[in-house]
Image (cartoon, rainbow, N blue to C red):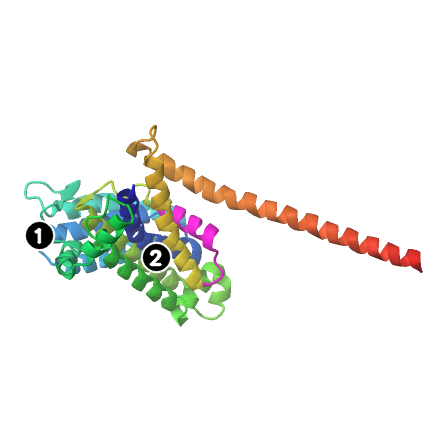
């Protein structure tokens, strides 16, 4: 049980980077960007292809981020310059990326143009390189002995992966917090709130939308590149439903932790991604559920995350109304009592 939850937390932290990208488009820019399903695979395919061709994992990851940024910018150009509906421009780019991703992975094959998947079982990744350094520190043995002393027998093989993805995600969160408070970041936020208002200040909303979509999909591609190296494979279908996972993370985090400040909201998105993976892991341990039910479970989680806060808010509002009515009734009783004494 502990090992399953530990793995879910690791994956949740990596997927949190993707969720931050989804937050940038859906919440900050107010743009329903479905490019995510394609750019996630673009990041994974680019990183896996370059690693298999012998490039350093760090360089492969950076190129994957750039590829995701370009994909997002193309969606922005389709919408702003081509005047295509936001939803449709994302769908068009997602469809185009499916073939592009096949072509990217096909670069590793000699006799075919496209390739649906790439295994990385015997290849060095960012995680394997960090693990080579981490294993010499002896921290794994100390932490696992501590857990065994607490009665937990199924201990993780290494804590190194959790540490490195946690550091990466925290750094991205801090950068995102800083960026959204800069002049450009504030302009992007204003564009999502009110395009007409920000245009009145001579801001180029088209450029801001393109930049916002590019940064969003760069984060999504980064997450895809890390997942490919974590899972040791890249597959053309691994991005299906990714937008729903990102939305689930954002909605769950916001419902639990709130959105009063940018720092709090980005933390909520990260926590939401981790909670989502934990819920998914626990759900899959139910006997009558199978791994093929993951998409159904995801849909149910999103539905509950959308509906439950409404019921909770309505319940709180009813309680406030009853409380106000009781207070008014009490005041009237006191006033009538005062008149009777007079």
Which residue corresponds to the image point at 55% horizontal and 45% vertical from the top-left?
312
Quadrant of the frame with the C terminus: bottom right
Q: Where residue 140 sits in the image (x, y, percent)?
A: 19, 55
* 107 inside magenta stretch: no
Number of numbered discs visible in the structure rendering:
2
Q: Which residue is mark 1?
A: 53
Which residue corresponds to the image point at 42% horizontal and 42% vertical from the top-left?
302
Q: Where residue 6 sits in the image (x, y, percent)?
A: 28, 47
Q: Is 49 on the left-hand or right-hand side of 258?
A: left
Q: Residues within 10 Å of mark 2 (few under 14, many from 20)?
A: many
Residue 2, compared with residue 217, is above or below; it is above
Q: Nearer the viewer, residue 329 or 124?
A: 329
Which residue corresponds to the image point at 35% horizontal and 60% vertical from the top-left?
210
Write the start and end of the magenta stretch as one range: 245-261
Gap between marks 2 and 1 measured at Cα: 29 Å
Q: Earlier in the sequence, mark 2 or mark 1?
A: 1
* 257 inside magenta stretch: yes
Can see residue 84? Answer: no
Q: Which residue is mark 2?
A: 213
Q: Is 140 on the left-hand or right-hand side of 150?
A: left
């Amino acid at each position: 049980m502990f090992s399953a939850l530990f793995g879910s937390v690791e994956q949740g932290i990596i997927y949190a980077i993707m969720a931050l990208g989804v937050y940038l488009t859906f919440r900050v820019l107010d743009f329903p960007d479905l490019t995510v399903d394609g750019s996630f695979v673009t990041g994974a395919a680019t990183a896996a292809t370059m690693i298999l061709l012998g490039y350093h994992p760090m360089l492969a990851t950076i190129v994957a981020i750039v590829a995701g940024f370009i994909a997002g910018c193309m969606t922005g150009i389709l919408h702003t310059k081509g005047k295509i509906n936001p939803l449709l421009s994302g769908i068009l780019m997602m469809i185009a990326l499916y073939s592009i991703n096949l072509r990217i992975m096909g670069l590793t094959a000699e006799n075919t143009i496209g390739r649906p998947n790439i295994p990385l079982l015997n290849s060095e990744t960012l995680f394997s390189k960090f693990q080579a350094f981490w294993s010499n520190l002896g921290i794994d043995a100390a932490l696992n002995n501590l857990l065994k002393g607490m009665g937990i027998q199924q201990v993780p093989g290494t804590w190194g992966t959790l540490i490195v993805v946690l550091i990466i995600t925290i750094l991205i969160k801090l950068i995102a917090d800083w960026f959204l408070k800069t002049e450009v970041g504030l302009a992007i936020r204003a564009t999502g709130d009110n395009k007409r208002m920000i245009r009145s200040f001579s801001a180029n909303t088209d450029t801001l939308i393109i930049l916002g979509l590019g940064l969003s999909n760069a984060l999504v591609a980064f997450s895809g590149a890390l997942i490919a190296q974590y899972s040791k494979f890249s597959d053309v279908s691994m991005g299906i439903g990714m937008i729903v996972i990102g939305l689930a993370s954002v909605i769950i985090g916001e419902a639990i932790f709130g959105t009063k400040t940018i720092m709090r909201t980005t933390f909520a998105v990260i926590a939401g991604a981790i909670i989502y993976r934990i819920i998914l892991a626990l759900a899959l341990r139910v006997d009558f559920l199978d791994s093929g039910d993951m998409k159904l479970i995801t849909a149910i989680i999103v539905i509950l995350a959308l509906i439950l806060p409404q019921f909770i808010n309505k319940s709180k509002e009813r309680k406030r109304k009853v409380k106000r009515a009781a207070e008014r009734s009490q005041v009237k009783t006191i006033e009538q009592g005062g008149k009777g004494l007079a």
